[in-house]
Image (cartoon, rainbow, N blue to C red):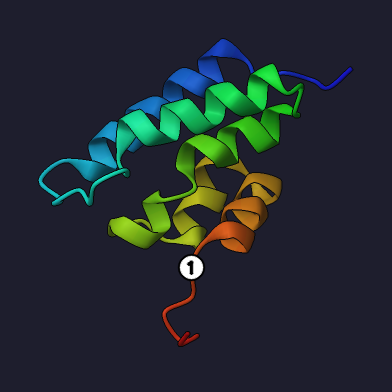
Amino acid sequence: MAEFATDAALREASKVLVSAYEGVPVKPGKGAPHARAVASALRLAGCSGDVQLAGLLHDVVEDTAWTVGDIRARFGRPVAELVDAVSEDDAIVG
């Protein structure tokens, strides 16, 4: 059975999510509601706590001033690596 993220960690990530998007124009289908839906689906699928946190934060690096380094400092290396792995790379065209 996968280890679920603690409620405290999810609350902290949710606060970061809302704060990061403050004042940022949100593209349709993105932002906090989308991220929360992703994290919820991952939890229901039995994914680990780190995967749930990455699901909640996965668009923050693409859409806001937050960096992978910021995610690493706040939530640890495993979560940051997951976020980095699923973030779009603007250097890749196509």
Residue 7 occupies which quadrant of the picture? top right
**Residue lying furthest left in this view?**
23
Residue 73 is situated, as x and y percent measured from the top left of the image, at 53, 49
Q: Nearer the viewer, residue 94 or 50?
A: 94
Label 1 residue SS: loop
Is disc 1 surrounded by few (<14), some (14 to 19) or many (20+) residues within 10 Å?
Answer: few
Q: Residue at x 71, y 48 (%)?
A: 78
Q: How many marks?
A: 1
Residue underneath mark 1: 88
Residue 46 is situated, as x and y percent measured from the top left of the image, at 76, 21
8, above or below 68, in the image: above
Residue 13 visible (yes or no): no
In the shown orientation, is residue 20 left or right of residue 70? left
**Residue lying furthest right in this view?**
1
In the shown orientation, is residue 32 left or right of residue 21? right
Q: Residue at x 20, y 48 (%)?
A: 26
Residue 61 is situated, as x and y percent measured from the top left of the image, at 41, 58
Q: Nearer the viewer, residue 27 or 18?
A: 27
Residue 66 occupies which quadrant of the picture? bottom left
Amino acid bearing label 1:
Glu
Q: Residue at x 56, y 51 (%)?
A: 72
Q: Residue at x 83, y 22 (%)?
A: 2
Residue 30 visible (yes or no): yes
Residue 25 is situated, as x and y percent measured from the top left of the image, at 13, 51
3, above or below 86, in the image: above
